[in-house]
Image (cartoon, coloured by chain):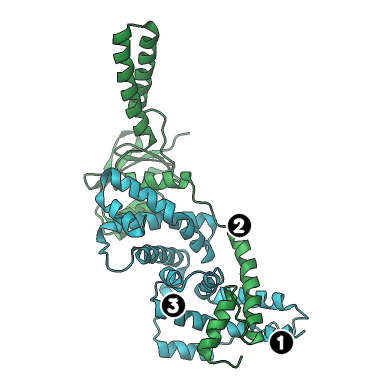
Chain colours: A green, B cyan
Amino acid sequence: MTQLPDKEDDQWLNALAGRPDPAADNVVNQQAEALRRALQAQRAKLEASVPQANDTQYQQLLFRLKREGLIKNSGPLRNFVLWGQVKGQQAAKTMLASNSALWGMAATLVLVVGVIVQMGGPHTDQDVSRNDVLRGGQTNVMMVENPESRLVELLAGLKEADAEPVVKRETGGRILVTVKSSDKVLDYLREQRVEPMVVDGMVTLSLQPNRR
Amino acid sequence: MTEEDIIKLIRTGGKTMDAGVKALYQTTAQPMLRFFVYRGISSEEAKDVLQETLLKIVRSAESFTGDGAAKAWLWQIARNCLTDYQRKQSSVGTHETAVNDEQWTRLEETTPGPTSTEGAGVQSVDECVAAGLGAFNNREPERAYVLMLQMDGMSIDDIGQRIGRTLAATKEYLSQCKKKIQPYIAHCTELLAA
């Protein structure tokens, strides 16, 4: 390796990239090529561990973005509701025009499906909790083994996040924790595997005993 | 669609934002997952860090000023999220001490070098280099990652965006990588003649 350092570096790096310079020192090329083989072998091992970016992960991302109020509901479920409404209206118009019993049944069916979906429909949200069971809605319902001990943990964490949570105890062992949303609060809750629903700048957690 | 276009879509909001988020995912998810795994975290952890990264990008899209490349900005967020994650996972954060360049050089000079594989029995050149690369990877994961990008034939500009350096600084960094890996593999060259 007797070339000028810059030139030798370039030759070595080019050989590493699979473009050896025939004019380069043999040792430079051979070392870079041996390293190239080692890196390729290492990459083959690592590639086996690289997860594929798929639709499930994308839906999870959308779910979290919705939970944080960053995007509005416009997913497949909403589209299906809109589709139901549009098709129902079209079918109803056709029914009136043709007075056909078959079209009447079809229109009824489509409308019923649309209404069922709007009433709640199949739940598509992902359960992001590992320990607690989360339920959706305006309040984040957490089904926990011991609401009081979970409350102590949450209050300590929220205090660390500079928050001032308000605690309200209700019948049946239910505890409501209301806290002003902030980046720190949301970060803390995410660390706790809670995906908070922010409503008017507030997050409400409902701790409920997990009776099995 | 460029990264600038994607950020513009996200900033617009509404249905346009949905398209932006989709494009963001399609463009960045796979290379970022690869980046996280190559930088030493597990497959499951990489998914978590990816989600944090994309959330942060969407949250911060409003603050993107347009100065500098959008792609570099996206990768900056990915690196920050990975660093945050790794810091949280290891408790070393509380034991860290800031050192300047001079102190770092002194530390390097006084720290024992990598364990030589010489005398560990006859090895082929490839085995010797692979062992050296393994040790280098443990000690200098970012440099090993950059060498892998170079091995892939990635442009200096793209490598710079991944590691948050300018073109000139990336060239210098690559030269340093070559120098830094030498103590781990230079002795293997003795086997080249064999």
Q: Residue B145, position in %: x, y?
A: 52, 71
A208 vs B159: above or below: above
Q: Mark 2: few, some, or many residues within 10 Å (few <14, many ≥20)?
A: few
A160 is higher (above) or lower (below) than B154: above
- Which numbered disc, 2 or 3, marks the residue closer to the eye? 3
B54 to B117, vertically: above or below: above
SS of the residue at dot 2? Answer: loop
Which residue was labeled with disc 1? B190
Label 3: which residue?
Answer: B170
Whole-angstrom CA distance, mark 3 to mark 1, is 30 Å
- Placement of B177 over or under A75, stated as above or below: below
Residue B40 appears in the picture as rendered? no
Q: Secondary structure at mark 1?
A: helix
**Whole-number angstrom distance, CA of label 2 to CA of label 3:** 28 Å
Neighbour class for label 3 at 10 Å: few (<14), some, many (≥20)? many
Residue A165 position in % (x across, y down): 26, 50
Residue type indicated by callout 2: Ala
- Estimate the x, y position of residue B125 in percent, counting from the top left: 71, 78
Task: Give whichever of A25, A172 is nearer the camera.
Answer: A25
Mark 1 in CB contact with mark 2 (< 8 angstroms): no
Q: Which mark is residue A48?
A: 2
> For this view, does B106 lie left or right of residue A18?
left
Residue projecting furthest to the front: A23
Say which quarter of the image contains residue A15. Answer: bottom right
Amino acid residing under circle 3:
Thr
